[in-house]
Amino acid sequence: MKTIRLFSILCTMMVFASCEKIVLQDDVLNTDEEDGTAILTISTRGVGDEETMNVNEAKIYIFNEAGKCIEILTTDDENTTTTTHLRAGTYTLYAIGGPDLSRFTLPSISNATANSLITLVETKVMDDLAMKTEVLTLEDGDEEELEIILERKIISIDKIELKSIPIDVTKVEVTLSSFYKAVKLNGTYDATSFTDYTVELTKEDDGTTWSVQPQELMFPSKGVPTITMILTTPSGTDSYSFTASETMSANHHITISGTHNAAQGSTLTVSVKAEAWGDNETFNFNYNESNTVYRPVAGTFCNGYYVVSVDETNRTAVLLAKEKLVEYEAPEAGSSSTIWRAALTTPMATLERPINITNNWRLPTSAEVAIFSKDTQLVTFSSTGYSKIYFCEDDGILKGAQTHHTDIEDNLNWSTTGFSASIRLRPVIDIEY
């Protein structure tokens, strides 16, 4: 009779003791397959490498030709061999190993399929994970040896670094998206579940470099990843985002290094170097102003624009035109509101929009004027407590409105008559983010 020996090996494991011990089957379905005359012996061991991984335990799911899981075999660092008897036939083996498989949700023999999802347990931290699928055919009395090389299924985000950040920046946050959240028992990733990774960087001693070394283990990126940076200043945030040219694939160390070009203001050059546990890869990214994105917070500045309001449910916001007011040709005093309204249309239509925004500027409502005309980031009150007067519109009715500030409260005053060239035109624009 021949003995079938299966070696589960990860190319970056630590070397384990070579002694072979017999361990009992973890789970066996009541079937005739295990009563066969073919003997399957499975061994797990490690191979030394410069970068090592502990495969302290492994599970091997055995499926018959009908696609049914009939056994789950288990090995660990002390018990590296397990043996089972099987009938002649073709079997599919799904092997999974790592330092601590209790960190992952694994299927039981009763519900295991090739598409069973393996996810990180909610309260656990991701650890190394390796998997491989093999198919073998057994005949009665066969004695064969089969070696399985487990393949690493995760990446490591080792370092994120941004250089030449302006000195007035008080916080730097980077979001990487999106990454798979689950892997199937057959080793493919689940395209329906994914997650983002967000981390806050720390300012270094030079005052312009921000970095973090998270050593974060994750499943690889779902396609080419997007890298978004949010720079916070005392007045608000500036956000930049771009899409990489390649995926962040499994079995790689990832380092993201970016340099902000202060001279050009809107230019950021980022290079991402991926050092594999196996091979090395390099990712290069170029950033320019067209990659601006918006992360608006009401009452702050977002990419230089004051945020009047934010609707987080619908992910929309209202931005105010920048400090430089729109110039317009004022009609004669006493002209009708229709004439005044027409005079305001052309300058709003020609005002440059925020980057990547296609909506048109519009007059603010009186409620929106009430918000920004009392904010001392934008306005200076007169000695009697009045702000400047701003054009606004409610239900098609043109108005001029201003805030009267007192020590007790702020009140909005408005009128539909008496329009003059002294009234400020400061439109707003609706955005989606």
Image (cartoon, rainbow, N blue to C red):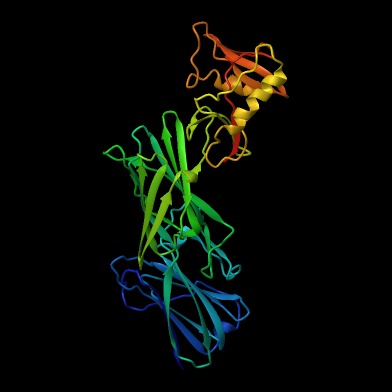
Horizontal and vertical percent position of residue 407: 52, 9
**Measuring 54% from the left and 55% from the top, which residue is drawn there?**
194
- Which residue is nearer to you in this view: 222 or 55? 222
**Measuring 41% from the left and 53% from the top, which residue is drawn there?**
285
Q: Quadrant of the C terminus?
A: top right
Residue 316 in view in this figure: no
- Which residue is nearer to you in this view: 403 or 354? 354
Judge left or right: residue 211 versus residue 364.
Answer: left
Numbered-mark total: 0
**Measuring 42% from the left and 51% from the top, which residue is drawn there?**
286
Vertical position of residue 151 compared to residue 376: above or below: below
Horizontal and vertical percent position of residue 244: 46, 55
- Which residue is nearer to you in this view: 415 or 174? 415
Vertical position of residue 139 compared to residue 124: above or below: below
Vertical position of residue 4 compared to residue 175: above or below: below
Judge left or right: residue 66 versus residue 56.
Answer: right
Judge left or right: residue 255 versus residue 246.
Answer: left
Horizontal and vertical percent position of residue 118: 53, 62
**Measuring 26% from the left and 39% from the top, which residue is drawn there?**
206
Horizontal and vertical percent position of residue 234: 41, 29
Q: Quadrant of residue 13?
A: bottom left
Vertical position of residue 173 compared to residue 9: above or below: above
Residue 192 in view in this figure: yes
Residue with the most extreme left position: 205
Q: Quadrant of residue 267?
A: top left
